[in-house]
């Protein structure tokens, strides 16, 4: 029994020891440096960006009151959300004639492209910052000795900076179009029953777009974070060291040339 207990204890300790070694190897103080601290902010705001956009849902609506006393007031409630394929969102438009009761209608527009690009970019940023933080905290010696890692990090950072600018601007324009297509006045304008004298239509409550507006703000914050981090990542690349070496190497030569000129009669 003692041998089996000892073997089970060693088996239980081995995963714990591996986890302890991994945690001990992490240099948490590097998070206090600009490069590590900004990567943490990039990780957080990437979650805020794709979370606020991908989880959005709203409602718009209107009421239709037929002049025919045989029919009651009809309330129309239309729910929509990410990925904002509004042309696939259905609702029933009441008809005021005696032959039919309602007609299936759809909202106008498909704004899934900028929304999905925005969310996808946020997810990729989330995973990349996790990988970069693991390398920076656990394998920082490899990051500094191998020149390829800083170069790859710099190129990826510049790419994410550009993509965040495009994604935030495109999603901001797409959100403006979504607001225009989901206004209750746009809903009543699209219903033919509201254009005649057989019914009276009134707009419902305007959908709340607070969470969607915040997602656009998070997109531009991500752009500024990645743009600001370009300088700190560039300082880790060999290009920054070569520029400093060239600057230091030219100063003695220029001083020698100036001295030679002064010695000439």
Image (cartoon, helix red, strand yellow):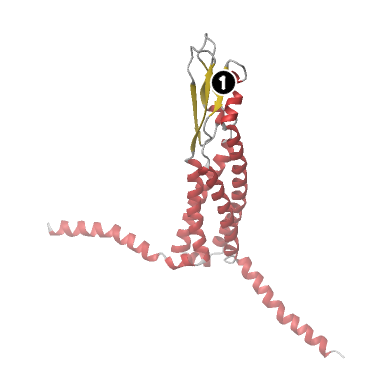
Q: Position of residue 119 (x, y in %)?
A: 52, 43
Which corner quadrant of the image does residue 137 belong to?
bottom left
Q: Regarding mark 1 in the picture, which secondary structure is present there?
A: strand
Q: Looking at the image, which is closer to me, 265 or 217?
A: 217
Q: Residue at x 46, y 64 (%)?
A: 31
Residue 199: x and y in percent read 57, 18
Viewer-nearest residue: 24 or 249: 24
Task: Name the residue nearer the viewer: 6 or 242.
Answer: 242
Q: How many marks?
A: 1
In the picture as drawn, the residue positioned furthest to the left comes out as 1
Residue lying furthest top in this view?
99
Q: Is residue 87 left or right of residue 2?
A: right
Q: Nearer the viewer, residue 24 or 177?
A: 177
**Split into 4 quadrants, where in the image is the N terminus?**
bottom left
Q: Residue at x 82, y 86 (%)?
A: 261
The residue beneath circle 1 is: 200
């Amino acid at each position: 029994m003692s041998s089996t207990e000892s073997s089970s204890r060693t088996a239980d300790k081995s995963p714990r020891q591996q986890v302890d070694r991994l945690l001990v190897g992490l240099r948490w103080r590097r998070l206090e440096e600009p490069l590590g601290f900004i990567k943490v902010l990039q990780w957080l705001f990437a979650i805020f960006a794709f979370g606020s956009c991908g989880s959005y849902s709203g409602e718009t609506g209107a009421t239709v009151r037929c002049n025919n006393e045989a029919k009651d007031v009809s309330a129309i409630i239309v729910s929509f959300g990410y990925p904002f394929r509004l042309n696939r969102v259905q609702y029933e438009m009441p008809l005021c004639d005696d032959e039919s009761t309602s007609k299936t209608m759809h909202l106008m527009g498909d704004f899934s492209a900028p929304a999905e690009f925005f969310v996808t970019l946020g997810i990729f940023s989330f995973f990349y910052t996790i990988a970069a933080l693991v390398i920076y905290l656990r394998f920082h010696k490899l990051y500094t000795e191998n020149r390829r890692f800083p170069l790859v990090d710099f190129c990826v950072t510049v790419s994410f900076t550009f993509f965040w600018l495009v994604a935030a601007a495109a999603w901001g324009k797409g959100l403006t179009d979504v607001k225009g297509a989901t206004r209750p006045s746009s809903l009543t304008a699209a219903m033919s029953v509201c254009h005649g004298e057989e019914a009276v239509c009134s707009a419902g409550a305007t959908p709340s777009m607070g969470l969607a507006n915040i997602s656009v703000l998070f997109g531009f914050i991500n752009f500024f974070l990645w743009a600001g981090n370009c300088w700190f990542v560039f300082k880790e690349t060999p290009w920054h060291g070569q520029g400093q070496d060239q600057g230091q190497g030219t100063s003695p030569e220029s001083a020698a040339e100036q001295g030679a000129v002064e010695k000439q009669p």
